Amino acid sequence: MADSNNSVFADIFKLYFFLKKKVSLAFKLTLVASHRKTFSTLREKLFKFKYPEIGDREEGYDGHYEWNSDDPIILEAIHDFQTAVRTRNPTLLLDILSSIVAGGEDGRLNAVINLLIDSLTSEESLKEALLVAITIGSRPMVEFILSLYNKFPYLERNGCSNSPNFSPHMTPLMLAAIMNHFSIVHCLLLRGHSIPIPHYPTCECYVCKRITVSTRSNIRTVDIMRAISSEAYLWLATDDVFASCCSISKDLKFLISHDGIEFIEVYRVLEANVQRFMARLSDMAWRSEEFNALMASKNHCETVMEKMSSPRIQMALNCQMKQFACTANVQTTMKSIFRADWYNIGNNRKRDLWRYCRCMMLFPFTSICNTFSKSNFRHVLIPFSRYVSHLVTYLLFLLAVIVRLFFKSDSLGSYIIDGYLYAYILGYTVEKLIMLQRIGYSLFVQCWWRVYDLLMITACLISLFCFIASKIEREAFDSTKVDRANWPSFDCRLMYEVSFAIACVIGMSKIFYYMQLLNGIGGSVISVGKCVGKVYTYLIIMLIVICSFSVGLNILTSPYNSRVYRDDPAGPGTASVHYGSLAPSIKNLFWSVFGYLGPSTYHYSVGNAGPDNSPVSHILQTTSLEILAAVYHGIIIITLMNLMTSLLVKKADEILDNEELEFKYTRAIIYSEFFSWEKISPPPFNLIHIFFSTGRHFMDLNKKKNQEDANVMRMNNVKFMETLRIIFDRFCASKECKYRSVWRSEYDKELHRLAHVQYLISNPNPRSVDNTYYQPKKRKEDEKSNKKLNYERKRCRKQQENDENNNNNRNDYNGIATPMPEQSSYAPN
């Protein structure tokens, strides 16, 4: 009886659990069905945020979608996304992500879903899922994944420590900036993400000293520079995109010069991208008022630049932003500042003649009066007027050098001319020293004419020192009382003449500096100046080769230097002295490059010996000498000379290809030199101006009377930020509406495309758009349509000609005039 009761209770429990499973399964199916029904409605609403994959188009309008994180649809979708992750529902995750990401059928979403499911047990999977979502480029997906970090928000700013796809130092913001996703960078910056800026390789701080030099640290620096030099980071993470570009360009140049050639090519590409981005910024200022508002801002400018017109342009020139300096806006602004009130030159000849005469003939009087009248002479403040005055004084310098040849060395006229020449050199030296202090040595020597100026100044100062030393009375030797034939070789008077001759040669070559502004030959002069650097490099290599072979030849011939041989026993003795010491060896090998050394110079004789007392020579030494000489000529003439010629041709071709760019950049630099205060008066009259200006500065006699107050500075900053906002909107719009314009015509010659970028909008699905504009390629459909259109046009012309011929024949036959046939319905309008 008990067993039967137990079996009944067991059957009842089995039936209870069976019914419970059925009810729970039915309840779950009902919940899933209701959830699917609810999500199907939500999915239809999310489809409006899904942008179709249209690819990168070179022309046309792409448009954008607005993204609002407070949208109830988005909030509901995020809630369902979090629920799907917690319940590990891959089907629901696929439905949600595929509704907002275009082209998710290729397997990209499956990888993200697998990482999201594993994120419940591993934080690294969640980090990797975020990085993969950034590479896909979908801001909604990034927003959805970031919502999973609500419990540990600081982990979202770190990279994956153990991932096969991403380096440990690769943070989400770095990856988004490298891929140039504007909207994702915007999203991450709003959540407090940042990029740590690395120190210079030469930094000696406490932290850098404790870090060991390794390849991984170099890779981290490269990735950080890739991130902070992107357009997205420069626009969104900095308060002044212009100053940031200049600073990053300077840092990249520093890394290029100090890199151990491992990543030098990467840095060069990044620096070129920053240069191109700066040029695009200039082109986005469509009105002169907007560009002037940007360039007139004094934020982040040095104190010396604040007194100049358009200090931002001077900042760009100091950072060697070549492409920016060659844009139309910069060239127009520089030209307007350079000419100032003389911008209308050429309209009135009489007025222009008076202006030139005033600068060429009255500049000593006007420059001195301007010094004491505190800049009341307006034409002295015009940079073009300063340029003309400097040119006139330089021509007077050349004339004085030529006229000095007609005076005796100790005459009164020669002393007067020498005094003027040295006064000019002294004023020129002071002017260049002020410029050197203002821009720094590295920027000063970037231009070839400034290097020539340093050489000329050095030679002139040496000649002045020797001239003064020669006029000092000496007890042991007085050159005025002794004939020149008895002077020592290194007398001060002889050294003065040599150094002064070198200074005059270099000084007369400075005429090329002023010729660079001429449209006709300016480009050729610039090309020659660029090629001179290559010549110096090969001259150094040639000098090293000559010295090395001179030492070897001197070692071979030194035992025979005191040997004398006679071809005729009764004749005089002969000694071989071509390579007697190191100095004549170097001289002979140098002139042998130009063919001034024959094979007979390599024959050495020991002396006379034997029964006939004939000259004796050692075959081994003579042969070795000739072999070394042949190897030397092969290295110098066949290798180095030909290689130098080919590389000079290559360098000249590169410069000629960019002749317009080099001409514009050089012209901008020369213009900027005459904006500074030290160029107001030409040498030697600038000595008076500089002396009194410096005295006023230290005595506080010229205090600023029109000093801008805080309100004016605040208004200028507001105007600057408003203009920057307008340019940013135009920059974003240029990613949507792509067409050919005058601003984008200079980028058709680019050989390499930039990385694909995305514009900053409130867009759920950013699209990658090419940064540059290229001429559209003809497609097959366009070619077919053009062929069809040409065929129809030819057919119309033939039909019209046949109709005209028929009408003419009919008119001739009937003898009456008839109207011309109307245009055919299929003829093109």
Image: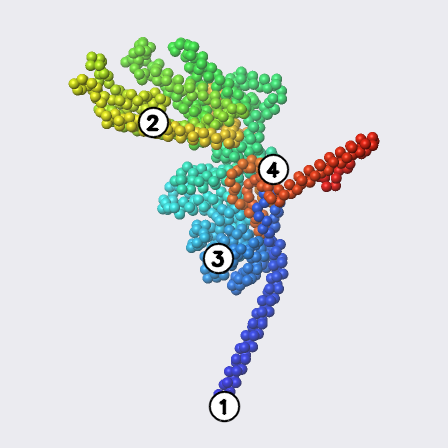
Circle 3 SS class: helix
Q: Which residue is mark 4?
A: 741
Q: Which residue is mark 2?
A: 633
Q: Earlier in the sequence, mark 2 or mark 3?
A: 3
Taking the view exactly as shown, the residue that stands out farthest to the front is: 813
Whether residue 639 appears in this view of the structure is yes
Tally the marks. Answer: 4
Percent x, y of residue 171:
47, 50
Circle 1 SS class: loop
Q: Is residue 695 left or right of residue 809?
A: left
User: Is the C-beta separation of discs 1 and 2 under 8 Å?
Assistant: no
Q: Which residue is mark 3?
A: 126
Relative depth, front residue between 266 and 603: 603
Circle 2 SS class: helix
Other residues around mark 3 within 10 Å, as few (<14) / some (14–19) / many (≥20): many
Relative depth, front residue between 243 and 649: 649
Q: Which residue is mark 1?
A: 1
Amino acid type, mark 2: His
Amino acid type, mark 1: Met
Q: Earlier in the sequence, mark 2 or mark 4?
A: 2
CA distance for labels 1 and 3 = 62 Å
Amino acid type, mark 3: Leu
Q: Earlier in the sequence, mark 1 or mark 3?
A: 1
Looking at the figure, which quarter contains the C terminus? top right
CA distance for labels 2 and 4 = 57 Å
Residue at x 43% of width, y 10% of height: 406
